[in-house]
Amino acid sequence: MRQKIGRWLIPVIGGAAFIYLLVPIAYIFVFSFNDGGRANLQWQRFTMDNWLNPCGAPAVCESLGHSLQIGVVATVIATVLGTGIAIGLVRYKFRFRKLTDVLIILPLATPEVVLGASLLAQFLNLGWELGYGTIVIAHVVFCMSFVIVTVRARVSSLDSRLEEAAADLYASPVAAFWKVTFPLLLPGIIAAALLSFAMSFDDFIITNFNSGAYQTFPKFIYVSATRGIPAQANVIGSAMFIVALLVVVTGQVISYRKNKQLENS
Amino acid sequence: MSLDLRSKAELRAEKRKNRTGVYLVSPGLLVLALFFALPVVILLAMSLYVKPPGAEVGEFVPGFEISNYGTVLTAYWPELLRSFFFALIATVLALLIGFPMAYLVAVRLREKTLLQGILLVLLIAPFFSSFILRTQAWKQILADEGFVAQALKFIAILPADGHLTATPIAVVAGLTYNFLPFMVLPIYANLGRLDTRLLEASGDLYASPIVAFTKVTLPMSAPGVFAGTLLTFIPAAGDYVNSALLGNNRDTTMIGQVIDSRFFKIIDYPGAAALSFVLMISILILVTIYIRRFGTEELM
Amino acid sequence: MTTLAEQTQAERTSGADLLLSGITKRFAAFTAVEDLDLLVPSGTFFALLGPSGCGKSTTLRMIAGLEAPSEGSISIGGVEVTSLPSHRREVNTVFQSYALFPHLSVLENVAFGLKRKKDKQAIQKARAGLELVELAHLANRKPAQLSGGQQQRVALARALVNRPQVLLLDEPLGALDMKLRRQMQLELKKIQTEVGLTFIHVTHDQEEAMTMADVVAVMNGGRIEQMGPPRELYELPRTAFVANFLGKSNLMRGTVSGQSDGMLSVDVAGRTILLPAQRAVHTEGEVVLGVRPEKITIDRAPLAGENQLSGTVVDVSFTGTTTEYLVQVEGIGLIGTFSQNRGQQPAAEGDTVFLAWEAEHSFGLAGDESVNAGVPS
């Protein structure tokens, strides 16, 4: 009897949790078709206008463009720097290792308000103008820790004898990195970059502290929340969700096919 | 003087190797030092600034005013405690919901690669649809005139004059919702490595499924649970979007909101800095106790 | 298309002498290799044999350039390479774990070294290498899709195609099952004869070392105990470790009591055993006297033979081709021997038996040796 409960309990709770996760997204998607005026609070009637003209509401597309740009730039920087640290930490010895470990873990253990506030204090102190540059720096800092943790796990599971084999087969350290280490780390690096982009794109609190008047997509929504969020924002939120879904599903299907092929050959 | 027994060739090889390590690590560490460590120090300094007599709003001079801490703590200790309390409940809820999710995807669906992949995507994809948009969606779903509130009132679970939004429950639900993926992903990563043959082995050794779960699955997923609870609790304790959007002005204010408003509305930099610092230190203390008590060797 | 073996025939001189002089390797807590001198002539199949932790793998890694020696120098073909990094040494390794690149196909794996050396014919040579190990039909597979034996051969081809001056094999057969191991031993030996490279083979399997190598060096505790052709090592071990690690030996303590015509008389627990002086490390005082089990004949009736013992059979075990006996000899201890299973068994448990061997089969070791050194536990 108890065994049977265990058998269906997990799928039921797990399945319900996935529905819980997706309810607001369904809501956002449905209300992206609402002809609800500026506030989009009550369902009025179905329209395709918002999807046909996603930039219709002022500042929606501009803020989206800013967020995408910051996401890409911050992700590239954080991924490059974080991957370097991850490899360095696992493979090499150097002084101040303990200190380095602390410096990497601490940003993860620091709430966003504190990260945002301390960076703001720094920028005020330096007299830097808040805007695009300060947001990118802030995003690099908090994305980097996630990159390091993700890539480090991958580096630790990488057999260092493969690098020795490469050196034994006349590969200089540089060639060994690009021909062996990097291709084997790539799945981890891609996962880290995706995570990093998602975190940057969706960040509000740290951005809010360090952006000045510069508009990002989450900031735009937060500010409009009091007056009502235009339906175009729902269009963009839904579209981003669908694009993310398609990108990852395509990747999954490709690797699934590849595995099938390997099994069959 | 210690005697270095290593040969020239050894030293050269080691130096060559370690130089590469330094090149790899330095740029990133420099960024972290300049834009994480140094800012925290500056924040600490700023928390001790003094407001000179007759100064304008937002004007402060460097000082050593420890009483800044006393002032903000006396005024805002309820918000601080509430933040930790909300974050704690949200973490426990996220664990209760998140563990079955992770177990379902990682263990039950192990053979079904495609379905597993799709569910995994559904865990990550919400990040791209903006969490503020989703929080706002919850607000509208749970609004007084919305379907859920009306239905609950109809079956009399909710009193006729009751609300779902603007309550502590709504804030905690929002926190749970928003940080759920941070709980699920590390547990998933850990359970993904769980060898199901171990469960068969324990079944072979007369363990009932429940015993097998508590004696094998749970201990083996401990590092994931550990990382997941930290990755949920820490941002939840500092969050203010949920309390701002789903809360009210009376009994849901969290410390993040206070810090934000002291920085931007009241322009009390030392007070905001002192509160930030108190938040950071209390979280570090809590996390250290937690690590000491339950910590595993490999943290993340 | 020419095969790799044919290509190599033309440049038979590609193998090179390897010289290690005064090599020492210290790690933080212990010394792995101590003052090692070694000359491996070009074209030799050389085996480094020893138990795990004896320093043989560390020696190999130093030759490959993966580890720098603490002291001493390494030269290959007369050129000192001690401080040359691994990727600039004309040395290739077949790793114990094979270390095949999982993201590359079999062919790409084999071509890896040639491509790094910018060899224009990398792909053709890699194909030829795969033909040599009879895996050309699997060129496009990934390593994970191959069996252990196939992976082992890919690893071998990957090292061989570069035609290094020295080829290192680090327990390359350790992961294979017994049958495959025997087959691969023969193949390896055949390939080495074909290509004529200097092979250095590290192993803890004494049978493997003896069947494959021209010269075997037995290593123990960071030093080479004894080195020579397998037969010489087996017939005339110079230390108790070699006597016990390389095959089995019966060792007994005694004192030299006299000498005549180059023959020592050794008093072992009151009996006199003959030992040729030139087969003894020490010719006077305390010695450890040894004899290989197969040199001893066993029977219930007294036997002819220069050295005689008698005792009681305490254990008989049948192994198929032979039957092994353990005989308790008073004052000496257990003596092992065996007989071919041709006809009647010479003895059963509890029988009183006579043991005999020729004096020329005795060997003498230093008297302070432990008779149990190198006995597999």
Image (cartoon, coloured by chain):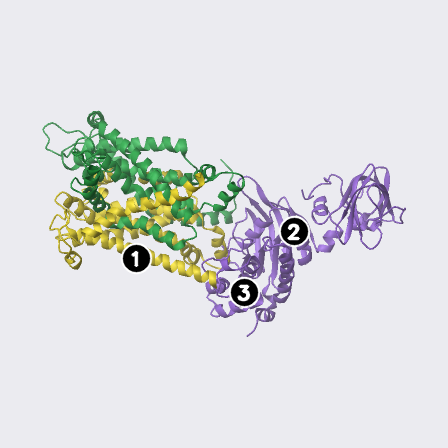
Chain colours: A yellow, B green, C purple
Q: Residue at x 27, y 35 (%)?
A: B237
Which residue is labeled 3 in the image?
C161
In which quarter of the view is residue B171 placed? top left
What secondary structure is marked by label 1?
helix
Query: Type of residue at label 3?
Result: Val
Camera-side residue of C187 and A17: A17
Which residue is labeled 1 in the image?
A246
What secondary structure is marked by label 3?
loop
The subunit carrying tag 2 is: C
Q: Residue furthest bottom?
A: C1
Query: Type of residue at label 1?
Result: Leu
Spatial CA distance of label 2 from label 1 is: 55 Å
Q: Quadrant of the N terminus of chain C?
A: bottom right
What secondary structure is marked by label 2?
loop
Which residue is labeled 2 in the image?
C205
Q: Quadrant of the C terminus of chain C?
A: top right
* Discs 3 and 1 carry the same chain letter: no
Left or right of B136? Residue C120 is right
